Structures are given as structure tokens and as C-alpha cells.
Amino acid sequence: MLTLFGRPQRYCDGLARRQFLKIGGFAFGSFASLSLPQLLRAQNPTTSSHKAVINVFLGGGPPHQDMWEIKTDAPKEVRGEFDPIATNVPGIEICEVFPRIAAMMDKCVVVRSVTGCDGAHDAYQCLSGWRRQDIASVGGRPSIGSVVSKMFGPVDRAVPPAVALADRTQHGPWSEPGSPGYLGAAYQAFKPQGQGMDDLKLNGVSLERLQDRRQLLSGLDQLQREVDATGMLSGMDAFSEAAFGVLTSSKLVDALDLSKEDPKIRERYGDGKPYKYQYDGAPTCNDHLLMARRLIEAGVRSVTLSYGRWDSHGQNFDLVRDHGSKLDQALSALIQDLDDRGMLNDVTVVVWGEFGRTPRINQGAGRDHWPQVSCALLAGGGMRTGQAIGATNRLGEYAKDRPVPVQEIIATIYHNLGIDPMHTTFQDPTGRPQFLVDHRSPMPEVV
């Protein structure tokens, strides 16, 4: 919420808090909402073309052996119901439910041997490369979006550098926006609510009236600043200036408004409806992939989203037919759309989940959790595409050829974004330098 400061009050915790007059969708100055203006720290725009990432999280754990590496030689209790189909890259076959992706495999990389999954049912590792418990005592590890926010700031002062599109899921960790970790709340991702409009509208307040209240805000804030012994408010003027820029600009609002998109493009992506097998997870919202492209085009550097609910303990094959065919439409549309607009070399697309699924099919025609190996699909980012990297053994139990640690994929994304994972460090709150990942070399096959 956009807020105006009232007279400070002192609470039992000894902190001077503020009362608020709410007129819109942002909050300035409360300790709980301090991050928003900091997130949107004003910097000069860079170039009209910028490196970016779209991280599509398949919450629940997609079945690796039913997507990019069909186990035709496995016994029936492992084999599954799907057949492989040829792609436009000779020698690479993928699951039959992905015919559109198969037709553009030359623009993609499939990784069939992802290792190092921690087994937790959340997005934390796919957004940061780390386990949630790593250096938790000093705030934890930052996500990719927070790192690019820290290093580069916004492309456009009216557009936040990192946006998380996932609507809140009943199982909350499946819709995480990505933690800022030890970098601090100033670098957390902006998360639109609902259709992303309520947080960005003046709700009937004219720009002239907003400017009057802005002057009042400045005056009252000065009074509070004089009694702020902690110094926490120092530097807030610049952050508030940037946040006002977002509020009074239509650029981010327009990017989130799909009614402004060409109807033919929207039809190409589809809407992913009806939403099936959602339960406590995310819907198969194809609109979010289109919205991600629009946000990148508007200046966002990192977009995260959660697509579907892949925790297929039962009805695994029916779920993959539903989720997979919808993902096939949306993802192929996104890749083609980025290519048509000359953006694909600058934008890395990564699609993956928190772990794989058991080789043996259970009595409910499902597959259970299997962190021993997982899979990923990447596209764009200037990579050498048209490849299938790694392989599992005949039963899909473990990585037999070319194990690829989760952190190696994260390092590749950083490399594509123009960040050197080999040497870049940040200081944590104890003053100790921290690398972005321990496994700091990107995948040599693609860079």
C-alpha cells in the first residue's frame, strides 16, 4: 500500500513505529515494508537490450523419466506409458506429450542427469542453487533475482529488476518469490497480487494530489528522521523517489496487462485451462509465461513463476498428459516469441523442479519422490543449444553419464546474465565473503 506517515508512536519493543494513511498499492517507511522502495532503488537505465532470466519452477517434482528421457528398455513396472518422439535434432528424442518443443529442440538444451537435489518440497534450491539451511544463521543464500538486483539495479527506474509471478499456493513453498538471503530485504523480488494491478494503481488519487501528499510525506518524514537514533531511515529519500516513479508510471502496469497483447500471440500461448490436478499447488497458468516475456521486454531482469503441481504420487501419467501438453504449448510459444523479437540470445529460460520421481511405478499409477536425479530444460541465453546432456542408467535411478549438479546450472545462468560465478562474492553480515555458488563453473557444453 502507498502510505503516508503519521506521528511516531513507541511500542513495547522500543522501536518508533508509524501510523499510515493508505491511498494506493505501495508502503513507504514501515519497518515491515521498508524493502519496497529499497528494491526499486533508482539507477540510470543501462541499455535497451539487457540480459535476463525466466525461471519456470515445476513445483512438486516432475518425473524425469516421463519427460526428456523415456526409458524404452526398462521393465513395465518402470517403463511407463509414454513413447519417445524424434526432435528436429537428429539423435535426440523426448516424451510424446511435447511435440512443439520437439520441433524446436535446436533452440533448447535438455539436461537428463541433474544431481544434488536436497529433497525439500520447495523452490528455494531452484531459485538460488543452495539448500535452505545453508548459512541460515546470517539470513541464508540469495536467489538469482536478488543477486541481479544487487549487482545491476533496474534497467528502468519505473520497473523493478526482479518480479515473482507465482500466485500464493496452499503449500506456500511452491510459490516462493526467491529469498534475498543475507543481501537483505532491499533486494527481494516484487510480487504482484492478483492480476498485478492493485499494487500499482492510485485508487482514485490524482497525480496532483499525490504530489501534495508527497510533500507532506517529506515533511513528516523529516520529523521522524530527527528522532531516529538508529539511522535506519537514512537514504530513504532516493528509494522513495524510485517507488513514486513506479507508482506514477504505466510501464509495469502495462506489462502485466495481457489485454494489451496481440490476440494472436495470446492464442499461441493458450491459457492452460481447465486447471487440473492443482490441489495445493500452482495452476497451469500459461498466461504467466506470456506475462514473463512482457515483463522482460519492459526491463525486468529476473522473472520467476510456478507452473503446475507435479507431485504425482498417483495418476502420474494422466497428470503428465495434462500438465505436459499445456507446458508444451506455453513454453514453445515463449521460446519462439523471444526468438521472433530478437530477445532469445539475451534471455535464459530454465524449466525444472525440486527433484525427480521414483523409477518404480506405485500401485496408484504414480511415482514418488526421488532426489537422486532430476532433469531440466534450458533455452536461449546465448548458449550452444540443440543438445541433450547426460543420461541416467537403464532404470532411471541415477546419473550414469555426465552428472550435472544443480549449482552448475545456476552457475550457467549467472554466466549468461553477465555475472562471473568463478570470482563474484558478496560479504555476508559477519563480513565474510560468500561466493554465489560452490560449484562455480558453468556447463562447458553450452557456454
Image (cartoon, grey):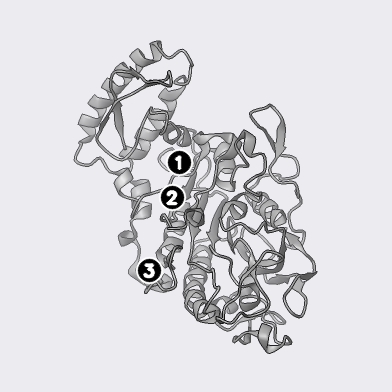
Determine whether the residue tagged by mark 1 lies in a helix, strand or loop: loop
Q: Amino acid at mark 3?
A: Arg
56 relative to 275, above or below: above
Q: Circle 1: is it few (<14), some (14-19), or many (20+) Cα within 10 Å?
A: many
Determine whether the residue tagged by mark 3 lies in a helix, strand or loop: helix
Q: Do the residues under discs 1 and 2 have CB atoms within 8 angstroms?
A: yes
Q: Amino acid at mark 1?
A: Asp
Residues 335 and 369: in front is 369
Residue plotted at (37% across, 54% down): 256
Residue plotted at (58% across, 51% down): 124
The answer to which quarter of the image holds residue 88 is: bottom right
Q: Which mark is residue 298?
A: 2
Farthest residue, direction right: 401
| Quarter the C terminus occupies | bottom right
Read off the residue under disc 3: 266
447 relative to 98, above or below: above
Q: Position of residue 255 (x, y in %)?
A: 38, 53
Q: Do the residues under discs 3 and 1 have CB atoms within 8 angstroms?
A: no
Q: Amino acid at mark 2?
A: Ala
Read off the residue under disc 1: 156
Residue plotted at (45% across, 34% down): 35
Determine whether the residue tagged by mark 2 lies in a helix, strand or loop: helix
Q: Circle 3: is it few (<14), some (14-19), or many (20+) Cα within 10 Å?
A: some
145 relative to 308, above or below: above
